[in-house]
Image: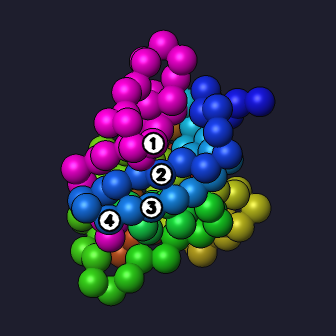
Amino acid sequence: NSIMGIQKDRVRFKVGGKIFETTATTIANAGRNSLFGAMFDDNWNLQTDGSDEYFIDRNPDCFAVLLDLLRTGELCIPSNIPEKLLYREALFYGLLDHVRSAKWGQFDGNRLRLSRSKTGQAPGDGTAIRAGPDGGCCVAHGSMVH
């Protein structure tokens, strides 16, 4: 039984000199479009150095955060890791969508609320959305502006 082509239950990584051990299921949570999906794809024929661990020359602190995200689905960024650095590492691993989703949550239209509505004139018949300097937005559809 394999997950994303991973034959064994446990997987070891050596990232920036630090050893990480996890399960194939955790790595599979990254998805096929991630670096891990590519690494364990049957078509890649990834080779180890004979030690049954995969070497990745990247930041081990960020790797730990991203691995925890794959384990739990929750993003906990320690204060010693700049957010920009974590995003860069997430981009490298193909996990940026995972990070964004964990940080902001899935878009849920039911959580939106109208703060105010204003009627007015909108040119043409199209729809337009404009962001306001205070973080709000205006939506124009036909002759209605909200």
| Total tally of numbered discs in the picture | 4
Q: Quadrant of residue 46?
A: top left
> As shown in the figure, which amino acid type bears the numbered disc 2?
Arg
Image quarter hosting the N terminus: top right
Marks 3 and 2: in contact by CB < 8 Å?
A: yes
Judging from the image, what secondary structure is the residue with disc 3 in? strand
Magenta range is 33-62
Is 22 magenta? The answer is no
Q: Give neighbour class at mark 4: few <14, some 14-19, many 20+ (Cα, 10 Å).
A: some
Answer with the quarter of the image where residue 80 lies.
bottom left
Label 3 environment density (alpha carbons within 10 Å; few <14, some 14–19, many ≥20): some
Residue 52 % position (x, y): 45, 42
Residue type, label 3: Phe
The span from disc 1 to disc 3 (Cα, nearest Å) is 12 Å
Residue beneath disc 4: 18
Task: Name the residue that disc number 3 marks.
Answer: 20
Where, by quadrant of the figure, is residue 31 drawn? Answer: top right
Are circles 4 and 3 on residues that touch, CB within 8 Å? yes
Q: Are the residues at dot 1 and dot 2 in contact (C-beta closer than 8 Å)? A: yes
Q: Is residue 9 left or right of residue 144?
A: right
Q: Amino acid at mark 4?
A: Lys
Amino acid on which disc 1 is placed: Asp
Q: Which residue is mark 2?
A: 12
**Label annotation for residue 52:** 1
Instruction: Give SS at disc 2.
Output: strand
Structural distance between the alpha carbons of marks 4 and 2: 10 Å
Q: Secondary structure at mark 1?
A: loop
**Label 4's element?**
strand
| Mark nearer the N terminus (1 vs 3) | 3
Residue 89: horizontal and vertical position, in percent?
A: 30, 54
Residue density around tag 2, few if under 14, some if 14–19, many if 20 or more, within 10 Å: some
Q: Is residue 105 above or below residue 142?
A: below
